[in-house]
Amino acid sequence: MGSVRDGLTDRLYGLGWAGVKKLPEPAAVALGRRIADFAWKRRGKSVLRLESNLARVVPEAGPERLRELSRAGMRSYMRYWMESFRLPTIPKERFGQDVAMEDEHVLREAIASGRGVVVALPHLANWDLAGAWVTAHLGLPFTTVAERLKPESLFDRFVAYRESLGMEVLPHSGGAAFGVLARRLRAGGLVCLVADRDLSASGVEVRFFGAAARMPAGPALLAQQTGAVLLPATLWYGESPRMHVRIHPPVEVPETGTRKEKTVVMTQAVADAFASGIAAHPEDWHMLQRLWLDDLSTPEEAPARSAGAGEATA
């Protein structure tokens, strides 16, 4: 039964990639909105979880406001998918028009330092589009990490898709990713990691919107071990240009403390930067899974990372 389900999943994603790429952009936008509204009206587990997460981000919001936010959130989520399916067909010169990079000088100065750069970002707006901007506009390849998906053929699709945009994609499983990332950074390279959720035992506990959550230790550990600059980034959709990216000030390595203590301090600083961006644009935060520790009522309910997002972690 599992192999049948995996095969169906792969075929559905394949149809999405093949079909949406052929649609005119306005038709793809309209299709994404219709799918989002259909899913939102069904009030399934993902929509309810999104609303529960948004209730922590916007604690003053009543039920009606939360429903408005979750509807906008599902539309933003499907916008991500429609854009991602179409990204390989978009001329590279358009990325400069479609993305507004705020505080771009912070990123450029960090790259020019030659120390290597770790950009940590949450599931906001379209992180793939931001990556495409980096490779096209700055002319820089970068390395990321992707969680292995099931079926394996679906993971291969995501890898091929991201590599077509100029990214080097490493599988998260197997334990070798951290060493490769460290080597890229020591050579002055750029590493980008989606880092707002880690339910593994190695996740660092942080305070996030007033409650405990776990986020990956990888960005902070890489910065400590290699001397790389750690830059949080947040994203949101606008009307024109299509998407904004803010590069936050560097997260410095504390001068004192153990490695673990430094990692906690740095990861909390990253979480605080994420929180500022998510609070400003909650409708663009695509967190449709459990995140906060007190939402995990039993070990069995701790979910695997979303296959849909193809998220990168360290």
Image: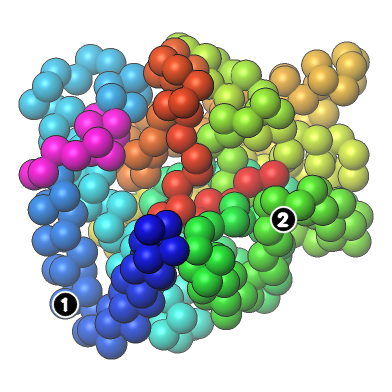
Q: Residue at x 57, y 30 (%)?
A: 199
188 in magenta: no
Q: Residues within 10 Å of mark 2 (few under 14, many from 20)?
A: many
For residue 89, above or below residue 279: below
Q: Earlier in the sequence, mark 2 or mark 1?
A: 1
Asked where in the image residue 278 lies, by quadrant, the reply is top left
In percent of width and height, residue 305 lies at 50, 43
Asked if one can make out residue 211 in the rendered structure from this viewpoint, the answer is yes
Dominant secondary-structure state across the stretch colored magenta? helix
| Front position in the image: 23 or 201 | 201
Q: Is residue 232 left or right of residue 175?
A: left
- Identify the image quadrant of the C terminus: top right
Q: Residue at x 88, y 14 (%)?
A: 257
Relative to residue 186, is residue 92 drawn left or right?
Answer: left
* Viewer-closest of 151 and 53: 151
Q: Secondary structure at mark 1?
A: helix
For the record, the magenta segment spans 41-51
> Helix or strand or loop: what does disc 2 sit on?
strand
| Residue that label 2 marks | 191
The quadrant in which residue 83 appears is: bottom left
Q: Where 259 sits versus 24, above or below?
A: above
Q: Which residue is mark 1?
A: 27
Residue 229 in percent (x, y) is at 78, 44
Q: Where is residue 295? Give x, y as percent.
A: 40, 18
Of the residues shown, which amino acid type is indicated by label 1?
Ala
Q: Residue at x 20, y 45 (%)?
A: 72
